[in-house]
Image (spheres, helix red, strand yellow):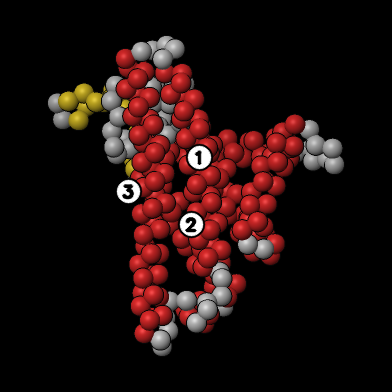
């Protein structure tokens, strides 16, 4: 069994290819909705364990926003950064479940027989991580405009002062590098982890892969937190009033 860089197409719906990573994305969304429903269907002042765990996670994320900015902006940014963290960590952890990458079928590409896993970790697909990065950057600019106003927002990039104009030009370039940074960091770490687990599991089926699975649990959490924190920091910086 080997791992391919590109996701494998399971079937086609019109012009849209349904890949195994896209299927995993849908499964992740269903799981998150199910967990959220189970944790909130009986909300009470004295929470049960699922509600308490959810409240702890959400309070932690909100407190991060308040600590880095202010209450008003933290409240505005909260929904998107919390969604990023929850969605990415669920996607990363679902990729470690038994059967992911190992349940599938064989198909023929020309004369060659190729193994196609039915489901594959979502973030091993650069399309998925790039989509998350695009949403992150787009929402960062949306919040900056809504907080500062369009004129003050443009003032962060354009100025009559040649020095500030050059700095603004560098800031525009930096906005594009955010896409590369966010998408490739998440993709690279999760893809490398899957490749490592596939290699180790093909050599030793039992016991030895366990430490590496534990490591991937840590990596999955850290990468979700990094993506969330970078998005939050980018939003805070871009929504600050310009000094020129």
Which residue is denoted by mark 3 in the rendering? 15
Give the mark, 1 or 2, whose residue is nearer the N terminus: 2
Q: Is residue 94 above or below residue 86?
A: above
Which residue is denoted by mark 2 in the rendering? 136
Residue at x 28%, y 33% (from the top left corner)? 4
Q: CA distance from mark 1 to mark 3?
A: 36 Å
Residue at disc 3, secondary structure: loop
* 145 lies left or right of 180: right
Viewer-proximal residue among 3 and 238? 238
Give the mark, 1 or 3, whose residue is nearer the N terminus: 3
Residue at x 40%, y 70% (from the top left corner)? 171
Q: In the rendered view of the protein, which quadrant contains the N terminus? A: top left
Mark 2, other Cα within 10 Å: few <14 / some 14–19 / many ≥20: many
Residue at x 80%, y 37% (from the top left corner)? 47
Q: CA distance from mark 2 to mark 3?
A: 27 Å
Q: Quadrant of residue 192?
A: top left
Mark 3, other Cα within 10 Å: few <14 / some 14–19 / many ≥20: few
Which residue is denoted by mark 1 in the rendering? 222
């Amino acid at each position: 069994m080997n791992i391919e860089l590109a996701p494998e197409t399971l079937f086609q719906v019109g012009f849209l290819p349904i890949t195994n990573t896209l299927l995993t994305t849908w499964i992740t969304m269903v799981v998150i909705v199910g967990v959220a429903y189970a944790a909130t269907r009986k909300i009470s002042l004295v929470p049960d364990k699922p509600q308490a765990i959810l409240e702890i996670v959400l309070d932690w994320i909100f407190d991060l926003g308040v600590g880095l900015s202010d209450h008003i902006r933290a409240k505005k940014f909260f929904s998107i950064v919390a969604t990023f963290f929850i969605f990415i960590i669920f996607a990363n952890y679902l990729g470690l479940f038994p059967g992911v990458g190992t349940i599938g079928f064989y198909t023929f590409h020309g004369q060659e027989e190729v193994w196609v896993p039915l489901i594959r970790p979502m973030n091993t697909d650069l399309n998925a991580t790039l989509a998350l990065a695009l949403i992150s950057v787009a929402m960062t600019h949306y919040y900056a405009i809504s907080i500062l106003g369009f004129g003050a927002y443009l003032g962060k990039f354009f100025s009559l002062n040649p020095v500030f104009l050059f700095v603004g030009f560098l800031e525009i370039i930096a906005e594009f590098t955010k896409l590369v940074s966010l998408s490739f960091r998440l993709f690279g770490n999760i893809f490398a982890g899957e490749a490592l687990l596939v290699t180790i599991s093909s050599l030793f089926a039992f016991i030895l892969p366990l430490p590496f699975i534990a490591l991937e649990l840590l990596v999955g959490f850290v990468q979700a937190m990094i993506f969330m924190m970078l998005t939050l920091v980018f939003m805070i910086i871009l929504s600050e009033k310009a000094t020129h």
